[in-house]
Image (cartoon, rainbow, N blue to C red):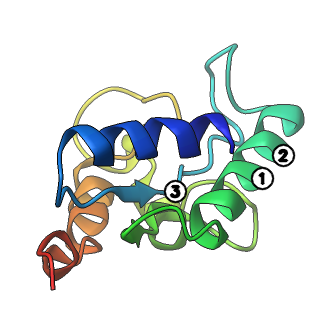
Amino acid sequence: MSDAGEVVARLRAKVPGVRVIGATVTSALGSTSAAHGHVEQNEKRIALNDFVRTSALFDGVVDFEKVALDTATGGMRPEFVPDSTTGGPGDKLHPNRAGYLAMGNAIDLGMVVKK
């Protein structure tokens, strides 16, 4: 069992009936952060997102990447880049308010209710 599988199993054993929701990670390509934004990190992110989507480990998945990804560049959608709204230039790692709103709207609240 993977480390994630062990954590989820322990959580389910400790909290019967808990719903465990996975979420994909948004792209950071082009980020000004030294720890993010480079190709190697992006490859790890893509592999993690694939695991989240396909592992069947979770009771539901929120696909934040699908909402925020600019498929033409592999980075964040231009309208979600922080300098496209009020505030500083941003880091191209964290979206602006419009991006967070879109991500929040991508959450199906029905998946947190046990059926």
Does dot 1 land on a helix, a strand or a loop? helix
Whole-number angstrom distance, CA of label 1 to CA of label 3? 10 Å
Whole-number angstrom distance, CA of label 3 to CA of label 2? 13 Å
Q: Position of residue 55 (x, y in %)?
A: 64, 65
Q: Residue furthest top?
A: 34
Q: Is residue 55 left or right of residue 46?
A: left
State if disc 3 and disc 1 touch (CB < 8 Å).
no
Q: Which residue is mark 1?
A: 47
Q: Which residue is mark 2?
A: 43
State if disc 2 and disc 3 touch (CB < 8 Å).
no
Name the residue located 65 percent from the left edge and 72 percent from the top edge: 54
Q: Position of residue 12 (x, y in %)?
A: 30, 48
**Amino acid type of disc 3?**
Thr
State if disc 2 and disc 1 touch (CB < 8 Å).
yes
Does dot 2 land on a helix, a strand or a loop? helix
Q: Position of residue 66 (x, y in %)?
A: 53, 72
Name the residue located 25 percent from the left edge and 71 percent from the top edge: 107
Question: Closest to the observer: 84 or 25?
Answer: 25
